[in-house]
Amino acid sequence: MTAPLAALEGVSVDFAGGVRALDDVTLALPRGTILGLVGESGSGKTTLCRALMGLVPHSAGRILFDGEEQRTWQRRDPRGYHRRAQMLLQDAVASLSPRMTIGAALDEPLRIHRLPLAEGRARLAGLLARLGLPAQIATRYPHQVSGGQARRIGMARALVMQPDLVVADEPTAGLDVSVQGELLNLLLDLRAELGLTWLVVSHNLNVVRRITDRTAVMYLGQVVEEAPSRDLFARPAHPYAAALVAANPALHGGPRRPRILLQGEIPSVLRPPPGCRFHTRCPVAQPRCAAEAPKLAEIAPGRLARCHFPFALAGAAA
Amino acid sequence: MDDPLLRIRGLTMTARTARGPARILSDIHLDIGRGRILGVVGESGSGKSSLASCLLRLLPPNLERLEGSVDLAGTDLLSLPEPAMAALRGTRIAMVFQDPMSALNPVFTIGTQMVDVARRRAPGLTRAQALAKAEAMLARVAIPDPRARLAAYPHQLSGGMRQRVVIAMALLAEPELLLADEPTTALDATVEAQIVALLDDLRRDIAGSIVLISHHLGLVAQLCDDLCVMYAGTVVETGPTAAVLAAPAHPYTRALLACEIEAGDEGRLASIPGEVPDPVAPAQGCVFAPRCARAEPRCHAEPPLLRDIAPGRRAACHFPGAVP
């Protein structure tokens, strides 16, 4: 296996007030693959993205990008890092300035990175056509475009930098299902055409199962399971992943309640439970789980989980 | 339906805009059976929430025209004088909104807010009696330590707890009709599953009917007896949920179902090309014709009426799909 494009090795992120938003996260993004990141609010998905983008400093571990540490990049070529790693923000409409035309917003990254404008604009014209946006859209203002179009504009703005990595935070949130498919097809096509590596954050498990190669599940600042998406959704190893998969209502098969119902809600990251962070809600927790924190370990070829008793809930979820 | 709780006939609502009148709801015919849960689905702008607001007669300030009738067990909600309508809200009709934080008053305790609701329904209750009812209802929606929670303020509860409180308040009113507009959209997946299980449990105890508005078809499939599919301010298909999902009759319902991602799907993802029609300049014929894969000349000329296509099933299409 070749070296991954980007990797987090034991990364922690601490915020003021003793909040550890990310705790000992290890995750690799192999070149040309799509990694899905799922978990509930407060689990650290967005912090992970921001750390990977170099927008928040990490207090422990290392972040590698194309073989070099992020800190080295930031010293040597910070613009280069930000050119090659792009992020699509969740609220695509709000990320466009209401007082700038779409054309001006599209030019902005070229100016910031001091790239030749003529060449960049030619590339933009090609991108707009590829993304199914009319060329006249450049003269419009953000309030004159639809939510789906705003997302494509965000994509064009990211892709004009010719990045290697694109981080997409909830790319389909708030979009109607009627346009969601088209956007996801585009994402898959662009990976093939441009050799892009994607990190896709989503609360929509159907989307993640369908488009990603691997999926990482986060809970309270930690990755609790990471596996090929097909395996993870078919047979989740971590009890939290199993509960999350079971909570996803299926369209067919009639009225059916989730067979794994968790008690309570995600605890505060200010006071994470001792031992395994999930043991307070885990239906199969043992005394050992409250005493000893499990490590992320390989539980089957290519499958990682942070659990003393992986697959303990697998029968119920299958 | 023999004796529905709610009978909507020819409900049409238009609003004034800078570009002219916009058609928000057009000619809606819909029955809600007693004790049934009706799921209303459709894309943004299809009129789902406007329909719910109309049932509470909470009308937009730019309302231009309101026609038709909404009959709740013999009372026409559209012609009722405002004081009588106000008395009906929170008693015979209750609503659960999407965001539980904005539905609760931040400066009063949960107990005070629940007592208000209980005494609005039964003005003779003492505060102690109302508090006892509130505590029992909090226990019913599985809130641990309900007595202590009565003294809590909304900000002291988690999002899932708040939505349970809002549901408990709605149930305290013992409404004949409970409207729930995207009640789990603001919640996390495992908490959403808890609320869905709760609603599923409660349905057996609730005498009244529930209208669940959601863009989440999986949720509707799990909870609702009947399904109503809306598009561009009209009802395009209604029927028992399982039957509609198994054999959708309207091309829009079929297209919407095809867009849902399910386990085992392969290949390209489906979408519905084209855009939702402009409410200010609605099309001549069928509202879905411009995006319909099998539209014929008649579809562009003549709007189809919502008509019976099989027992219990109706669709607004000139060429509905075969239904077993």
Image: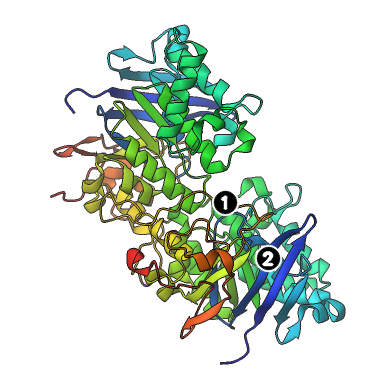
- Is residue B225 among what the camera can see? yes
In the rendered structure, the residue with mark 2 lies on which chain? A
As drawn, B174 above or below A159: above
Is B70 in front, or is B97? Answer: B97
As drawn, A84 above or below B255: below
Q: Residue furthest right?
A: A75
Q: Residues within 10 Å of mark 2 (few under 14, many from 20)?
A: many
Residue B273 x %, y %:
42, 56
Q: Name which residue lies at 51% across and 51% down.
A: B188
Residue A276 x %, y %:
57, 65
Q: Name which residue lies at 73% across and 47% down.
A: A98
Is B244 in front, or is A250? Answer: A250
**What secondary structure is marked by label 1?**
helix
Q: Amino acid at mark 1?
A: Gly
Is B274 in front, or is A46? Answer: A46
User: Colour scheme in the image?
Assistant: rainbow
Q: Residues within 10 Å of mark 1 (few under 14, many from 20)?
A: some
Give the residue pinned by disc 2. Answer: A22
Whether the residues at callouts 2 and 1 have beta carbons within 8 Å, the answer is no
Quarter of the image for residue B262 reads: bottom left
Give the residue pinned by disc 1. Answer: A147
The N terminus of chain A, quarter of image: bottom right
As drawn, B284 above or below A245: above
Q: CA distance from mark 2 to mark 1?
A: 31 Å
Residue A20 x %, y %:
71, 62
In the rendered structure, the residue with mark 1 lies on which chain? A
